[in-house]
Image (tube, helix red, strand yellow):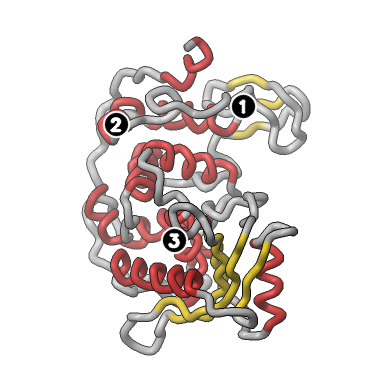
Amino acid sequence: MDYPRAGIHYPRSHAELQAWFPTDADCVDYLDWLRWPGGFICPSCAHPGGWRLADGRYECAGCNGRISVTAGTIFDRTRTPLTAWFSACWLFATQEDGISALSMQRSLDIGSYQTSWAMLHRLRSALARPGRDLLAGTVEVGEAVVGGGRTGGDGGEVLTGIAVEVDHPGGVGRCRMQVLADGSAGSLTMFAAGAVAVGSQVTTRSTKPLPSVRLIAAAATRWLLRTHQGSVAEAHLPAYLDEFVFRFNRRQSSNCGMAFYQVLGLATAHNPVRLRDLLASPRPRTARARPAPMAQPERPQASRPWRAAHLR
């Protein structure tokens, strides 16, 4: 595929999302297509080809291993229906400022706040794609304190390395952010090495003021306060910074369906994230449990335009 097309490779609207994915079977087929667009490849032995079993899993033609479409992804062992996951991905990807766990719980009638919170954190964990393009051209690199606004003992403020492309026609370009181990020059240098391409013209605080770095720091702090009311524990701030960078670097795109497609693609390529890993840091606040939604009757199989894309 040269470039994914709206209405064929991803839905153009929330109404089209609902029409495409009325059942978990439709969601599984879409994830199958995203994960193995050219056909099944065994994740264990890398052998191409296999058989689809009656229970929906694949059996590898090479090692005879059996694997489900969701195994080894963000959706591995999930007890939440995939239809709810797809709706959550749509809200997460298409809301201009993102969505809080409480808002998503209410919008999707999810049974508990912790489930909604964990779903969003699993999606955030997939956003920093390994091997993504480094910043290039003229780049400002510096550090700033990001976060704050929390009440109580945890201020949610951390020293953050920020790199941002400058001298773009429309203002600043892409950015990268990473929590620094300390305020030393060595920590900032290591961050820059992993964020900026070799040969770029790098401007640091030692040579001139960094207005673009300050702009990104202020924008990230405002976003945390606006969308999450500052309720971000320091231990989870790196994940929220990844989300901010994902949104900021796509701020000029008006194609919400493409963002949904990208988030799902990253989620299928990411290793599983267990709840115990998310809760290794302070436990999220609890909220009163809501009744689980009633099971919906099975509906007819939807049209699957992504499977017929090669015919168009």
**Residue that numbered label 2 is attached to:** 18
Whether residue 123 appears in this view of the structure is no
**Residue that numbered label 1 is attached to:** 58
Q: Residues within 10 Å of mark 2 (few under 14, many from 20)?
A: some
* Dot 2 amino acid type: Gln
Q: Is residue 206 above or below residue 5?
A: below
- Return the mark for residue 244: 3
Whether residue 311 appears in this view of the structure is yes
Distance, label 1 to label 3, CA atoms, is 37 Å
Q: Nearer the viewer, mark 2 or mark 3?
A: 3
* Dot 1 amino acid type: Tyr
- Return the mark for residue 161: none
- Between 57 and 238, the one lying in front of the other is 238
Residue at position x 59%, y 26% in the image = 37
Q: Nearer the viewer, mark 1 or mark 3?
A: 3
* Dot 3 amino acid type: Phe
Q: Whole-percent x and y of residue 200?
A: 69, 60
Helix or strand or loop: what does disc 1 sit on? strand
Q: Is residue 55 above or below residue 312?
A: below
Label 1 or label 3, whichever comes before in sequence order? 1
Residue at position x 34%, y 56% in the image = 98
Q: In the shown orientation, is residue 74 left or right of residue 51? A: left
Q: In the shown orientation, is residue 239 left or right of residue 87? A: right
Label 2 or label 1, whichever comes before in sequence order? 2
Residue at position x 35%, y 37% in the image = 83
Q: Is residue 200 above or below residue 266?
A: below
Q: Whole-percent x and y of residue 144?
A: 51, 79
